[in-house]
Image (tube, coloured by chain):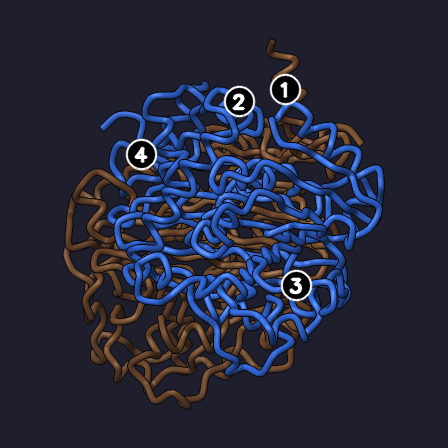
Chain colours: A brown, B blue
């Protein structure tokens, strides 16, 4: 077997090339399809809440999962204070491996890929939960995730308009500028209330670590779909508790969402619906046109698995990886030390 | 800040160059010192048993830890059947990151590095537990780890002789050949009993998944130190239970060793001594010359952390890494999507 030592690596540069080659809309649409496929076989996955290492300023997490054939994990940090230092709040990379051998088959940057899969997941959820013919989305929080959300909802849910609001007007201006060529009608708004005017979908995507109340109860009318994305962790919420009590709540993986999501504000036995059951038809999505639906997004390992699987499949035909000499591969597997000796002899 | 996107990567090739440049004996001696330093501040580490994903043929594990300043984890698989397919039983890579930012600072192969740190750990334990002036070691199991063990015990404990035995004579021949220039007196033996003749230290390092009994009670005389390395997992042991009952048992991290180590054969409350307490002087090591001491080695995340820290420190002065474009680094951290647009404009 040749090149057992090599693991294909997708750098940030190659991930950008891959996304630009296919187009972000197509990539997010296809990742949503991969997520949907994996959610349909939810019960075949190993599931565990993420393994977090908390510090005073942030968190570093490992998110592993496996479908019995492939194993994937993501390394991801969350450091809200990083932005002020010119660093990303969230950076990530991920790995896919064969369960049968334990050998890695893909290492990839996942900062961009996480942004894509998060937006794909939100739009996939909304395609089951949002009012039919929703055309207008309020986008509250216009940071790194905002454009991805807007474009995923355009591609997957068919929205035609986004209304932007951020406490920092320069973030809104950045977002509006980046979406200028998208075909979306984009309106910069001066308040969250203004952004929500006539919106059938409300996406909140802010990054404060403190308990915040981006939306209060009186701001939310009947029939809307709320897509609460925010940078999730214990102590971090975006919605007033009263909104939650009026909403039908949909989550990815309850044991994780109860710790990290909006529903950390509710009783631990408050009823929620698992999104995979909506996708398989075992549970109902939106009931009627006056119901408030809420996707309490926190991001789950299976979505990263789907995204890794997607990138791995793309590399069958696309050249956007480089070989990484990551696995020691002695001719005789028991002769690891001999590999060192032969390298020494060769160098001499 | 320049090059925020870059993570230094140590390939297999560069790890070999680093080890050959410094010499394996020096590397293992220095890693043992790093482990000793970290064991002395044991209580300052986040400790969690490894996170394992088991399948019928093997296991894939993540082993994270943090000292509050740095965070490290290792990816490692264990697939005993791999050898028959020309693959490594164990392959690994690891990462070191800053707790303050969550940004990775080192990605490295860890198959070779794990072999080095495992042997360094064994020799460090033996330096506290083995009889004084132990000169002869029996080495039962002559696979990928064997030479590293022999050389670490030579460098750190001052042994001058190894007696080799493996059920596969070609493994013994391979090991003897690789150790020919080491300065150790090397004897190939036809049985475990023969290998153990006059040995003050007995190292077992076999890789069967089944419950095996490499050593039976009558084979082990008073006063020896047993270094039970084996490929550890639930259901995998090397020593007869009666040996354990006669031994003073030393372990790395009891919650993990009780699941994976030799002591899985004993009652869950069977007394064991934590090695870090021996190193700090809080607990006694060897009591007298007739005591049988047993290091029930399973490998713990802090040892990998020490090894990662060592490699990271070496890269301050040695050139054995390459830059990996792994972290998305937009000029404005909130403008991840704009980074894509600018890459597109640049390519056009």
Q: Quadrant of residue A42?
A: bottom right
**Which residue in the structure is indicated by mark 2?**
B20
Q: Kindly indicate whether the residue at mark 2 contacts the one at mark 1 (C-beta within 8 angstroms).
A: yes
**Which residue in the structure is indicated by mark 1?**
A343
**Which residue in the structure is indicated by mark 4?**
B330
Q: Nearer the viewer, mark 1 or mark 3?
A: 3
The chain that hosts pointer 3 is B
Within 10 Å of disc 4 (Cα), the crowding (few <14, some 14-19, many 20+) is many
Q: Nearer the viewer, residue A60 or B225?
A: B225
Q: Quadrant of residue A246?
A: bottom left
Q: Nearer the viewer, mark 4 or mark 3?
A: 3
Whichever of callouts 2 and 4 sits on the residue coming sooner in the sequence is 2
Position above or below: A254 against B163: below
Whichever of callouts 2 and 3 sits on the residue coming sooner in the sequence is 2
The quadrant the C terminus of chain A occupies is top right
Within 10 Å of disc 1 (Cα), the crowding (few <14, some 14-19, many 20+) is some
**Which residue in the structure is indicated by mark 3?**
B221
**Element carrying mark 1:** helix
x and y percent of residue A220 in the render?
Answer: 27, 76
Q: Nearer the viewer, residue B12 or B180?
A: B180
State whether discs 4 and 3 lie on one chain. yes
């Amino acid at each position: 077997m040749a090149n057992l030592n090599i693991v294909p690596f997708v750098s940030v540069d190659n991930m950008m090339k891959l996304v630009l080659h296919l187009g972000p809309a197509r990539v997010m649409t296809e990742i949503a399809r991969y997520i949907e496929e994996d959610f349909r076989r939810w019960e075949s996955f190993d599931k565990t809440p993420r393994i977090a290492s908390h510090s005073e300023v942030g968190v570093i997490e490992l998110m592993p999962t496996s479908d019995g054939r492939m194993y994937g994990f993501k390394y991801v940090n969350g450091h809200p204070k990083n932005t002020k230092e010119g660093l990303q709040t969230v950076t990530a990379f991920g790995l896919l491996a064969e369960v049968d051998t334990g050998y890695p088959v893909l290492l990839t940057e996942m900062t961009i890929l996480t942004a894509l899969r998060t937006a794909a997941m939100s739009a996939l959820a909304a395609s089951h939960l949002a009012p039919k013919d929703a055309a207008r989305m309020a986008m509250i929080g216009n940071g790194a995730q905002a454009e991805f959300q807007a474009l995923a909802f355009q591609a997957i849910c068919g929205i035609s308009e986004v209304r932007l609001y951020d406490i920092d007007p320069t973030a809104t201006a950045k977002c509006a500028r980046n979406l200028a060529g998208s075909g979306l009608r984009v309106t910069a708004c001066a308040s969250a209330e203004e952004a929500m005017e006539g919106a059938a979908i409300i996406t909140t995507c802010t990054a404060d670590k403190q308990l915040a109340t981006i939306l209060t109860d009186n701001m939310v009318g009947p029939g809307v779909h709320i897509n609460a994305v925010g940078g999730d962790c214990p102590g971090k919420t975006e919605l007033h508790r009263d909104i939650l009590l009026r909403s039908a709540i949909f989550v990815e993986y309850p044991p994780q969402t109860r710790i990290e999501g909006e529903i950390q504000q509710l009783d631990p036995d408050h009823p929620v619906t698992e999104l995979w059951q909506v996708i398989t038809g075992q549970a109902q999505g939106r009931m009627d046109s006056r119901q408030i639906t809420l996707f309490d997004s926190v991001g789950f390992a299976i979505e990263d698995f789907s995204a890794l699987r997607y990138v791995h499949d793309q590399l069958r035909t696309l050249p956007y990886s480089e070989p990484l000499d990551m696995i020691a591969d002695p001719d005789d597997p028991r002769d690891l030390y001999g590999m060192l000796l032969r390298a020494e002899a060769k160098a001499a």
